Structure formats: structure tokens, C-alpha cells
Image (cartoon, rainbow, N blue to C red):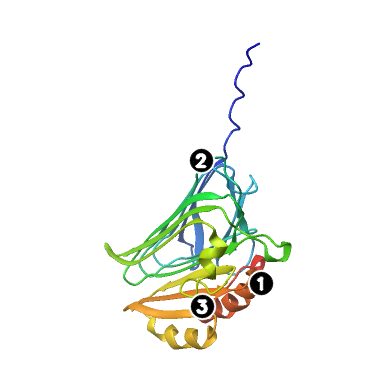
Amino acid sequence: MHHAALPLQPRARGALEIATKPAPGGGTALARLRQQGALRALFPRGGGLTAVALNTSGGVTGGDRFTVTAEAAADTRLTVTTQAAERLYRAQPGETGRIETRLTVGAGARLDWVPQETIVFDGAAVDRRLGAEVAPDGTLVIVEPLVLGRTAMGERVQDLRLRDRITVMRAGEMVFADRIAMTGDAAAIMAHPATGGGAGALAALIVITPQAERHLEPLRQLLVGAGGVSLIRPGVCFARVIAPDSFELRKSLLPALAQVGVALPRVWSL
């Protein structure tokens, strides 16, 4: 007896596009919002324009495709975060989830890209890319926290395929690039003194603004023992933050983000 092959499980798809415009009388208003598939945005009331992205599929696995586009038009301010931590789940053999983020900061504008943690589960396979274009007098803050398993539940990520790329252009010139590739036993990779010294969580914090230099020393003082901070070039400050787990990572990130002027949404509260 022959059995028909079972169809593949449908994969999640989602696209979210947010753009701002100056509001009459000052401030920032929403110019454009497009939501497709599993991605949605909420806009809680409060100072400034804050978008809280929500993945209704509950996470990312092999074969999923998600795209987020956010644009802060000239002289506006936009904060983009997530309602909860994103989860990268086990993928089927040969499948890879893909997440693409595109950020644009206009003249005199500010965009804070501050998603909550991305939690990686054993067996995950994800290709994630973030590309940004910043005007010479614009300000862009990016934080990307990554948690390798849930420490409190004794999880160990021993099978991982992760590629994570961040590229920032300013006036057509590449001013920042960060690349992470983890294949295999992530816990063993992070155990090495040169990579993490046993850390179970890490984050990239990128500050691009004409006044980036003034954040260098305060960030170094705040992050003593929790990572390193460098001035990559004029106007570009970068910190790599490491911690044993997500809770300790937040304890380091919260004051660091406050130092660079991020007004964190309530969803980020410890």
C-alpha cells in the first residue's frame, strides 16, 4: 500500500513596516504602517512614538521568514522594541529561519532599535541580518541581546547554526560591521576565555551619533567586568556586553541604555 507524502508544515511569514513624519506643532507622528502575516505592532501611549513588535507565531524556526523595516524621517524620533523575548526554536534538518531588519535614520532624527532578548534553543538554525542607513547628523542606537538557552531550566545549546550580521552605513560609507557565526556546541564556544569565558548571554550595543565620544568613558565605568567598550571611529561607539544569564545581562544593559539616552518602554522593566 502506498501512502501519499505528508505535506510540509506551513512556515511562518511576517513583514512589518513603520515610518514616521513630523507631527503638526512638533513631535512625531506615524506616517506609514504595514503589517503582514505573523508580525504586528502596538503603539502604547506615552512620550514620543514607540512601536512594540509582536510575532504572533510565537517564535522562529527553520523555514520562517520575517522582515522588519523602520524609518525615522527627518527631525522625528522613533523607538522600536518587542513585546516579549523572541525565541529561536529547533529547526528541521536542512532548514534555516531568516530574519531581516532594515533601519533608516533621516537628518536630525533619532531611532532606538531596542528589542528584548532573543533566546536560542538547542537545534536552532537562523540567519539574521540588520542593515541601517544613518544621516550624518542622525542618531541610531541598536541593542541586540542574545541568550543561549534558559539557564534556570538547565538548558544547554549544543547544536546551533547561527549567523548574525549588523552593517551600518552613514552618508553612503560603511561605518560599522559586526559578524557572529556559531556552529555546533554554542556552550563550548562561549566557554573559551577569548569568546565569553562561560557567559550564557551577550549583547551588542551600538551608538551612532555625532556626540558618541561623550558616552565612551561613562559606558566603560558602567560595564566594568561585563564587557568592553570602544570608539570605533568618530561618532561610532560600540560595546560588547556579556553575562551569565539574561537577568544579569539586563542589569548591565539598563543603565547603559539610560546613559545613551534611550527611554526604555515599560516592557523592558526587570
Q: Is residue 216 above or below residue 98?
A: below
Real-space Cα distance between discs 1 and 3? 21 Å
Residue 245, quarter of picture:
bottom right
Q: Residues within 10 Å of mark 1 (few under 14, many from 20)?
A: few
- The amino acid on which the numbered mark 3 sits, given as a three-letter code, is Gly
Q: Nearer the viewer, residue 140 or 49?
A: 140
Q: Nearer the viewer, residue 58 or 74?
A: 58
Earlier in the chain: of badge 1 and badge 3, it is: 1
Q: Position of residue 219 (x, y in %)?
A: 49, 83
Residue 134, quarter of picture:
bottom left
The C terminus: image quadrant:
bottom right
Q: Nearer the viewer, residue 187 or 217?
A: 187
- The amino acid on which the numbered mark 2 sits, given as a three-letter code, is Glu
Q: Position of residue 244 (x, y in %)?
A: 62, 73
Secondary element under disc 1, as helix, strand or loop, is helix
Q: Nearer the viewer, mark 1 or mark 2?
A: 2
Q: Nearer the viewer, residue 219 or 92?
A: 92
Q: Which residue is mark 3?
A: 261
Real-space Cα distance between discs 1 and 2? 31 Å
Secondary element under disc 3, as helix, strand or loop, is loop
Residue 229, quarter of picture:
bottom left
Q: Position of residue 254 (x, y in %)?
A: 59, 76
Q: Which residue is mark 2?
A: 95
Q: Residues within 10 Å of mark 3 (few under 14, many from 20)?
A: few
Q: Is residue 237 above or below residue 1?
A: below
- The amino acid on which the numbered mark 1 sits, given as a three-letter code, is Phe
Please, which residue is most extreme toward the right here? 153
Q: Position of residue 27 (x, y in %)?
A: 50, 67
Q: Which residue is mark 1?
A: 247
**Contact between labelled residues 2 and 1, with CB atoms less than 8 Å apart:** no
Residue depicted at 66% across the width and 11% down the height: 1
Secondary element under disc 2, as helix, strand or loop, is loop
